[in-house]
């Protein structure tokens, strides 16, 4: 339905259903530091990403939305189509970057320059590449890529959910405390830099715990 809407109407619709309180946008300011906003495929995630991208880019910030190319996941073509409607030119302030070797390099460069990058951390291709982390009273397979990007770029991770509201398609964004993956230290050796694997794994359960808290009991 959204893909078929004319661009002006689509912009108005996304704006009309966003009920995020004004004070809550401060969680995404970042103070000039790169930021990975990690949001799962939950609730109103697509309108939530659009709302965040619009708000951040309107303030002059570089915004990238990072996900697998449609050739790997056919359903992602709809995201490319919506981006083409809302931000049709190269200078529109919001870029789609696909999860390829070149795309990862582009994301790292942008984060080092203070960009905001939206990533969906609940996606993986092969279970062999995942680690188990606690989530909603059980265990979930996840990859460590969000934490790896944060550690290598010096960015912080901000957990986010787009919580559906009772009225129609309305939603509000909810953000958790920022996670600094590069600052984590192994408890037994707090003075030593952590190994890359330790730092990435230590940050990932924090991220999913925060996501679970933001979701509450709503699965």
Image (cartoon, rainbow, N blue to C red):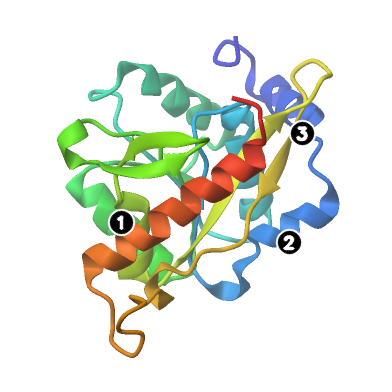
Residue 109 in sight here? yes
Nearer the camera: disc 1 or disc 3: 3
Q: Element at badge 1? A: helix
User: Looking at the image, which residue is at 74% across and 55% down?
Assistant: 25
Camera-nearest residue between 21 and 176:
176
Q: In the picture, which quadrant includes the N terminus? A: top right
Kindly check if marks 2 and 3 are in contact, taking CB atoms under 8 A apart as contact.
Answer: no
Q: Position of residue 89 (x, y in %)?
A: 49, 41
Camera-nearest residue between 12 and 144:
144
Residue 173 is marked as: none
Q: Is residue 112 above or below residue 88?
A: below
Of the image marks 1 and 3, the number of the one nearer the N terminus? 3
User: Looking at the image, which residue is at 62% across and 74% down?
Assistant: 31
Identify the image quadrant of residue 9. Answer: top right
Q: CA distance from mark 1 to mark 3?
A: 29 Å
Provide the residue designation for mark 2.
Answer: 26
Pointer 3 local density, CA inside 10 Å: few below 14, some 14–19, many at least 20: many
Kindly check if marks 1 and 3 are in contact, taking CB atoms under 8 A apart as contact.
Answer: no
Left or right: where 219 falls relative to 143: right
Q: Position of residue 155 (x, y in %)?
A: 44, 67
Residue 18 is marked as: 3
Q: Element at badge 3? A: loop
Camera-nearest residue between 174 and 214:
214
Left or right: where 31 falls relative to 99: right
Q: CA distance from mark 2 to mark 1?
A: 26 Å
Provide the residue designation for mark 1.
Answer: 106
Q: Furthest-left residue in view? A: 128
């Amino acid at each position: 339905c959204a893909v078929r809407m004319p661009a002006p109407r689509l912009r108005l619709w996304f704006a009309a259903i966003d009920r995020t309180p004004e004070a809550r946008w401060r969680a995404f300011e970042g103070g000039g530091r790169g930021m990975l906003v990690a949001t799962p495929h939950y609730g109103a995630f697509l309108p939530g990403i659009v709302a965040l991208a619009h708000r951040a880019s309107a303030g002059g910030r570089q915004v990238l939305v990072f996900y697998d190319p449609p050739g790997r996941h056919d359903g992602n073509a709809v995201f490319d189509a919506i981006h083409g409607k809302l931000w049709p030119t190269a200078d529109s302030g919001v870029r789609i970057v696909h999860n390829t070797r070149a795309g990862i390099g582009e994301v790292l460069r942008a984060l080092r320059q203070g960009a905001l990058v939206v990533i969906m951390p609940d996606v993986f291709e092969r279970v062999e590449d995942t680690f188990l982390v606690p989530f909603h009273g059980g265990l979930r397979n996840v990859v460590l890529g969000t934490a790896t990007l944060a550690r290598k770029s010096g960015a912080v991770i901000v957990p986010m959910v787009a919580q559906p509201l009772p009225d129609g398609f309305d939603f509000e964004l909810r953000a958790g405390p920022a996670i600094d993956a590069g600052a984590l230290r192994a408890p037994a050796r707090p003075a030593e830099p952590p190994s890359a694997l330790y730092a990435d794994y230590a940050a990932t359960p924090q991220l999913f715990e925060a996501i679970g808290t933001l979701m509450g009991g709503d699965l």
